[in-house]
Structure formats: structure tokens, C-alpha cells
Amino acid sequence: MLEDLFQPMHLLVIFAVALLLFGPKKLPELGKGIGEGIRGFKAAMREPAPEATEKVAEKKAPETQHQV
């Protein structure tokens, strides 16, 4: 089903509609913004969440308190 979605003619029509909607001057800025957003999302996905790193550090740290 998805293999028929992005045929060359479909992509040309999508590009033509985007060109008509945003104009030739705004289109490169729009592409740049989308690209930066995707790169930022990928970078955020590679970094572990601060809560996760704290939990891992807590589990790895030996207990220093002795119960009396």
C-alpha cells in the first residue's frame, strides 16, 4: 500500500502545491526549518533522559550507609 504512495508523479504534484502555497522564496526556509527540527529530534532520541541516568547511577552506586 505505501509503495504506491511516493511515486515520482505524486512527489512532483506535492512539490508543485508546496511551491504554489509558500512561494519560491519561502520554500528553502521551510525546508531548512524542517531539516533542523528532524536533526534536533534525532539528537534528543540519542541522548538518555536525565531521570534515566540518575536511576542507573543510583543502582550502580554502592550503599555507603550502614544500618546500626
Image (cartoon, grey):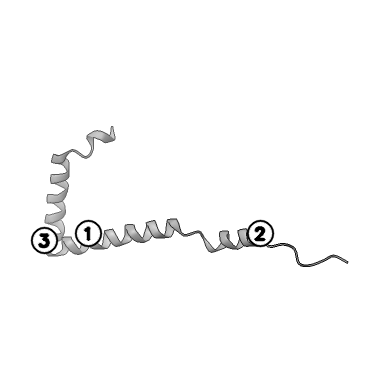
Q: Name the residue tied to disc 2.
A: 60
Q: In this orientation, which residue lies closer to the viewer: 29 or 46?
A: 46
- Residue 51 x, y percent position in the rendering: 57, 62
Q: Amino acid at mark 1?
A: Gly
| Sequence-wise first label, 1 or 2 | 1
Which image quadrant: the C terminus?
bottom right
* SS state under label 2: helix
SS for dot 3: helix
User: Which residue reaches farthest top?
Assistant: 1
Q: Residue at point 62% right, 62% down?
A: 57
| Percent coordinates x, y for residue 16 in the rendering | 12, 50
Q: Which residue is mark 1?
A: 31
Q: Nearer the viewer, residue 20 or 56?
A: 56
Q: Nearer the viewer, mark 3 or mark 1?
A: 1
Q: Residue at x 27, y 59 (%)?
A: 34
Mark before the other along the chain sequence, 2 or 3: 3
Is residue 44 toward the left or the right of residue 10 in the image? right
Query: In the rendered picture of this protein, how many numbered marks are placed on residues?
Result: 3
Give how far apart the Cα atoms at labels 1 and 2 are: 44 Å
In this figure, which residue is indicated by the disc labeled 3? 24
